[in-house]
Amino acid sequence: MPLLADYRAVRSRTVELAAPLSPEDQMVQSMPDASPTKWHLAHTSWFFETFVLAAQPGGGRASDPRYRVLFNSYYDAVGEQWVRARRGLLSRPSLTEVHDYRGFVDQSIARLLETGGATEAQLGTIELGLHHEQQHQELLLTDIKHAFGTSLLEPAYRPPLPHEAADTPPVRFIGFDEGMVTIGHDGEGFAFDNERPRHRRFQRAFAIADRAVTCGEYLAFIRDRGYARPELWLSDGWHACQAEGWRAPLYWTAREGHYSVYTLAGVRPLDEHEPVMHVSYFEADAYARWAGARLPTEDEWERAATDGARGAGHFADSGRFHPGPARAGFVGDVWQWTQSSYAPYPGYRPPAGALGEYNGKFMCNQMVLRGGSCLTPAGHLRPSYRNFFPPAARWQATGIRLAKDA
């Protein structure tokens, strides 16, 4: 029963990621865009209960019907939601009660799969729920990193691992001729609705870097007054830079003339050979202008990642939770901003019902990222995968890949 095995593996992994955290850690919410670990544990259970178990004949909910509101993220078709910015105030239910809730849901889903009573629609929703939970595994890590990394104590989530020391290979630009290309999910295996339909686009000739921008390369931008030169920035980016006081990527601190960086293993000296991480779209775009290049479009990225060398960096499975030395490849280590606005593909139609709110309702004021990061589960990605965040977001594991017109 492969789906049941996958279900148990994904659900167990979420609990494992939360295990190093105290009950107090799991309640903290450091900003409105982040969520407490305890809420992630509960919401991912709410998803299976709401969209799978409640559809069963005689299906009900766990003992407390208020969970329907407390752990609903943004599904207006389901009903009311607790205010996102106040999730950190939910001292009740307790962490023990949340784990009991997960146990109730897990037993119910296992029973459904073991008896063979699940419909095709329910099986598809369970598979969707597992990929949804993997997204929340990454969010769990980025959200606790923000809580710890902005704390005066700068605590470590895990002990340090041996440092990977390596020089950065010179960047190489891979050229592609102009022509019609086909992008989007090819129909094999799972994909989110926003990866479809597969369609054709015309591309002009371009070249794309074979690796991500490094901390050392970004440091040169900082030392050349990149954060003080409005001609490099989009208007909204310049305003955000000034309003937020950006002078370096998130988690970088200048100490005695040198930069240190907060990682989930604590603070350590900046490694100039690692990909730069925790930069906004605005910073990525400004850096690209400074470097005499631009950011790739998402279809350029997908073509290169599909047809070119797809060497992989680090994923969450390694337990490192931090980029390794930059190397040629398109996936892993850092998500890469593209210059593409998050919009529907030609012919896109959201699924019917509440699950149609999963992706489609966010196709406005977001930018597309590609490639996955050191916090992404390795099996979660494919070349057509589209991540998206607002252009000012910095707490995700976001980096930079350059492109040029040929």
Image (cartoon, rainbow, N blue to C red):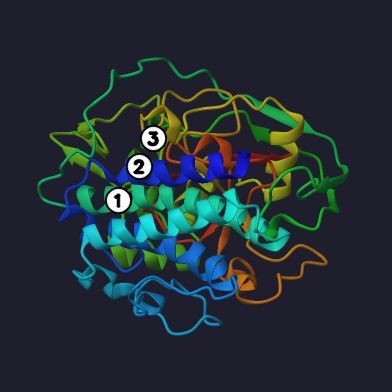
Q: Which residue occupies the foreground of this view, 207 or 88?
A: 88
Q: Residue at x 15, y 37 (%)?
A: 255
Q: Is residue 40 left or right of residue 256?
A: right
Q: Amino acid at mark 1?
A: Arg
Across and down, in percent, residue 19 comes to 26, 42
Q: Secondary structure at mark 2?
A: helix
State how far apart marks 3 and 2 are (Cα): 5 Å
Dot 1: element: loop
Instruction: Out of 184 and 108, give the one closest to the viewer.
Output: 108
- Residue behind mark 2: 222
Q: Position of residue 65 (x, y in %)?
A: 37, 79
Callouts 2 and 1 close, C-beta under 8 Å: yes
> What is the distance, in whole Å, between disc 3 and disc 1 at their CAs?
13 Å
| Dot 3: element | helix
Q: Earlier in the sequence, mark 3 or mark 1?
A: 3
Q: Which residue is mark 1?
A: 247
Disc 2 residue type (three-letter) = Ile
The image's mark for residue 220 is: 3
Residue 76 screen position, x and y as percent: 52, 82
Q: CB of mark 3 within 8 Å of CB of mark 1?
A: no
Seen in the image, is 357 located left or right of residue 263?
Answer: right
Residues at badges 3 and 2 in contact (C-beta under 8 Å)?
yes
State which quadrant residue 371 falls in.
top right
Q: Is residue 3 left or right of residue 282?
A: right
Name the amino acid type tagged 3.
Ala
The Cα atoms of the two marked residues, 2 and 1, are separated by 8 Å
